[in-house]
Image (tube, helix red, strand yellow):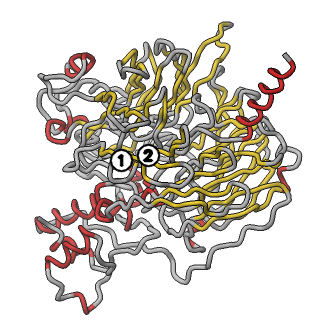
Amino acid sequence: MGIAFLLFVLCAQALADDWPLHGRTWSEQRFSPLTQINHKNVSTLGLAWLFDMNTVRGLEATPIVRNGVLFTTGTWSVVYALDAKTGKLLWKHDPEVPRSWSRKGCCDVVNRGVAVWRERVFLGTFDGRLIALDAQTGKLLWEVNTIDRTKPASITGAPRVVNGKVIIGNGGAEFGVRGYVSAYDALSGEPVWRIYTVPGSPDGPHEQPELEMAAKTWSKTGEWLDTGGGGTVWDSMAFDPELNLLYIGTGNGAPHARHRRSPGGGDNLFLSSILALDADSGQMKWHYQTTPGDSWDYTATQHMILADLAIDGKERKALLQAPKNGFFYVLDRTDGELLSAEKYVTVNWASHIENGRPVETGQGDYSREDKLVYPSELGGHNWHPMSFNPDTGLVYIPAQEKGWVHSPDNFYLFDYNVPHIEQLRRNQPAVEEGGYLIAWDPVRQKSVWQVKNATFINGGTLTTAGRLVFQGTEDGYFNAYDALTGARLLHLYAGTVIMAPPVSYAIDGEQYIAVMAGFGGATLFMLDDAAAAMKYKNSGRLLVFKLDGTNVPLPPVITASPSSPAPIMQKQGDERIHQGEKLYVRFCGSCHGMFGSKSILPGLAGMRPEIKGTSKNAIRGIFRDGNGKVRFSVSFIFNHLRD
């Protein structure tokens, strides 16, 4: 009995010391039981070590820490294994993603991390492959293609390993793909099952029974028949081993606007939904759609948290999600019953949730005229993970307050580029726009405390048994807050934008906090004036902190402000210019800036004299194959980057 108990204690401590899964546990709570760093001493936190990721693009990975080794990913899906105590590089694996594939992704060449299982490291690559590596050496064990390579699909999310199967989805709904999630045998890479999230056609044949029901919620005409419908599974997953249920979140429609996608209306299942699947077969057990007929890019791919909560005097197995649409959902994860849903940010497209469905106000209908809609397409909460502290009972949400002008004619309209914005704001809520950290009580469905950040785009959160919440921000700070009161206890300047969520682990009795730092992703073209990347080079780094550490060395000061391209013309008389605008927005603008937005990558606003005579074939090679770095005028691109 004594030996067994000792082994149990040692095993529990080993698990507590590691960060073995994406959310630390299958429940994805992002809660660390470590207490050496706590609300009384966190003010002394400093740098233990850093690792230069050699990039100026976005870093979004959650590091995995197991047995003293830290596994993480950088841009272009490169995997790194580091000594978690010293930062020494143990091995590196570059899957050699073709650089030309970058135009097939909406949101930078980011990657959110790996899964580690039985001495194997699993990675989804930006160009749609799933690979398995030897955890000791980084040697390639197997590799499978998971996508139709003729389609603009990509993988940026982290895989999960459940019951010996690697689960992976992909992105691409913005460019026109059909959503699905797949399971592969973790040892061999052989496919086990694949579940589609939207029907392939109105009349079938349907790959699974649920799609026959879903097809009835789609129009028999519309652009979805050409674009695939969307509904991609590009990020969130959670797993309940007791119920053997795998929970996945699905994305937006293709195209975004339902009046174009499915002109006959309908809920368009299973867009913007939470799906519960049997982990062994993939069979759907239940679904809940957060945004029926989504027209606003209100994905339900935001991280889900599993927690057991006492609601109305009864213990419930709950699933928590704060998706982009602005409502915080509490579901019974056994059967999908909605327990509650309340607004956690400003919402004007719907008034409330009734009988499980949003009651729309009409403010979100932009099929005939421009409408200012809250939340924005960036969501009340985006991909940045939230966390749950079982000690406080609170969820810590990296939230965003902002509106978005939706137009029947123009896909991208930003409020600062719309002449009639003041007219659109009439009779709409007065909103203090910006980025917030919200401590949310999921039982009472109310905010307990909140902090307004200096910038709009901010990092995911970590909470610990030390009564702490950690979050990095776009203005380059790494912060710690009292998990109960919201008092800021640490305000450490790193000089690099932090979007990724931190993790915590311990080695030899010493606790560490690790976080990836580097700006990019979906907001690469929306640099805030207060962002650290406006002053310092956007040097991508892995930062690891400990008590009584040192100061963080700042990146080099930049000598010129990040680029701000000239706005794209809104009135086009030349069809070539109109076609060029669409090409630029689709393939260039999200990285190089558009409509006057700032980007950390070079703006396409000038052309050197020596390239004016460059041939069209050379231009195509530069932009499509990635075999050159030059500056072109926007009009030059418009006229030459065409089939």
> Relative to the observer, which residue lies in front, 33 or 391?
33
Give the image location of residue 360, x and y in percent. Answer: 37, 26
Label 2: element kind: strand
> Relative to the observer, which residue lies in front, 376 or 484?
484
Q: Residue at x 36, y 20 (%)?
A: 281
Residue under numbered circle 1: 143
Which mark is on residue 132? 2
Q: Report, in whole angstroms, how far the alpha carbon at label 1 lies from the one at label 2.
A: 6 Å
Give the image location of residue 557, x and y in percent. Answer: 61, 79
Give the image location of residue 629, x and y in percent. Answer: 33, 78
Q: Residue at x 43, y 29 (%)?
A: 248
> Relative to the observer, which residue lies in front, 265 or 191?
191
- Is 150 left, or right, of 351 in this rendering? left
Tag 1: residue type? Answer: Glu
**Neighbour class for label 1 at 10 Å: few (<14), some, many (≥20)?**
some
* Residue 330 against residue 346 in the figure, above or below: above
